[in-house]
Amino acid sequence: MPVDKGVTLDPARTREQILQVATEVLYEQGLDGVGVAGLCTRAGVSKETLYRHFGSKEGLVRATLEARSDRVTRWLREAAEAAGPEPADQLGAVFDALTGWYAEPGFRGCAIVNAAVQHHEGAARQVAARHMDRHLELLSEIAARAGAAEPGVLARQILVLMEGAAVVADLHGVDGTGRQVREAALALLRASAARASAG
Amino acid sequence: MPVDKGVTLDPARTREQILQVATEVLYEQGLDGVGVAGLCTRAGVSKETLYRHFGSKEGLVRATLEARSDRVTRWLREAAEAAGPEPADQLGAVFDALTGWYAEPGFRGCAIVNAAVQHHEGAARQVAARHMDRHLELLSEIAARAGAAEPGVLARQILVLMEGAAVVADLHGVDGTGRQVREAALALLRASAARASAG
DNA sequence: AAGAGATCGAACCGATCGGTACGAACAGCG
DNA sequence: CGCTGTTCGTACCGATCGGTTCGATCTCTT
């Protein structure tokens, strides 16, 4: 019985295939909602292969979340940059992108936050902390260019809006959430800028 | 060998004991982080007793989360009412209460949201949705009394701040989160009230 | 042609999972 | 006293968990 290994036998390809399946399945089912055997079946890969690439389930989770953090960070930054030079436009564009995400079928909140909350110890929490640092960096740049009174504080307030929006859109319903949160973020930006020019 | 059943043999007491332990342990370890056997050990109760009271682990989770939702809802409403008649004071008091919570040792975010995110199907999501409805009710009352332009929208924006604050305080650090989010909520309230009197 | 490395499928491991069953010990009530 | 219902401790169930091992098979490189 010949064994089907796919077209090529490329370790990097195999790794990517596992990562892609894990990204979907761990998001849909939760970290504890699927076993390694199930992951392997869906990825069309044997357990030995998975363990050689990632060492453990924890290692696979870490790699999956780190890749996702990279992707999301890049996505939001590009959305901001595509909106032109105005800080308010950039902030609006970020929340427009998020609003589209909430409405996607299968949306279940932020995968990284969800993972961090499921396992109170482990890699997910570190990845989540770093993920938020990256968001904060982007938001701080926008806040500073907008002339905010305290760019760091404003950025953190908007970060809270971002994370809260994902939770509320997931658990309480998408309707209007994105738009409402976008307006809240812009209102905070205006208030902070006004305070800076008045003070 | 005499069996130790505790001082009294009161079903209601037994039930409360299980609920109290489950509230702590499920929050600390996560829904999948502890088995029914472990719960029973920590509660000083046999598996048969637990299953007679709650039917299943899912039933125990539901009862635990519903009790918690009741408690949190009462707690926030009392905090608001204790702050006097001014809506802004009441809103500030709500976030002061939350800020104190974030700083408590063992804080791990909102137990109900965490549970809902861990099991994408099941009782936790229903409890979470209802939990947010209750928050929204309180916030809408405050927003309406503050003369907000759109009380429902403002309440939802502040709800997003509440949920996001718990996530950020848990995963990104407590420092300043409570105070910053409190100020953000009050800023949104002021902006909405100003818009209402101007329009 | 031959070796090196990647992969598969399946068997296997000990541990744990949620849930059930049972006999014995206990309390409260008539 | 004896009846009813609660609880305990323990054993047990089938299933699944994360992880390891092994021989066979396949591709690529030299």
Image (tube, coloured by chain):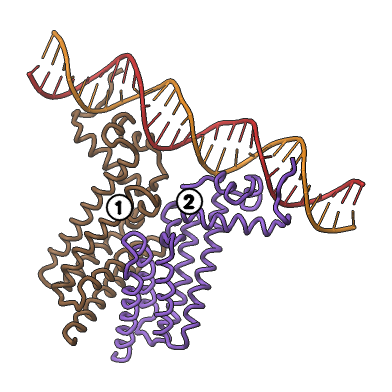
Chain colours: A brown, B purple, C orange, D red
Question: Is residue A36 or residue B18 the one in the foreground?
Answer: B18
| Mark 1 Cα-neighbour bin, 10 Å: few <14, some 14–19, many ≥20 | some
Residue B163: give x, y in percent of width and height. 38, 66
Q: Is residue A177 above or below residue A6?
A: below
Per the image, the residue denoted by label 2 is B31
Q: Quadrant of residue A99?
A: bottom left
In the displayed structure, does residue A65 sit left or right of residue B5? left
Which quarter of the picture shows residue A180?
bottom left
The residue at which mark 1 appears reads as A126
Kindly identify the residue that appears in the image at 46 percent across and 54 percent down.
B28
Element carrying mark 1: helix
Q: Nearer the viewer, residue B28 or D12?
A: B28
**Residue A60 position within the rendered picture, expressed as x and y whole percent measured from the top left:** 30, 41
Residue at the bottom extreme, as displayed: B197
Q: Kindly indicate whether the residues beneath marks 2 and 1 are on one polypeptide chain.
A: no
Dot 2, how many residues are within 10 Å of its Cα: few (below 14), some (14-19), or many (20+)? many
- The disc at residue B129 is none
Picture layout, residue B198 above or below residue B169? below
Name which residue type carries label 1.
Gln
On the image, which quarter does residue D23 sit in?
top left
Camera-near label (2 vs 1) is 1
Report if the CB atoms under discs 2 and 1 are less than 8 Å apart: no
Tell me the element at label 2: loop
Report in which chain the residue with disc 1 lies: A
Structural distance between the alpha carbons of marks 2 and 1: 21 Å
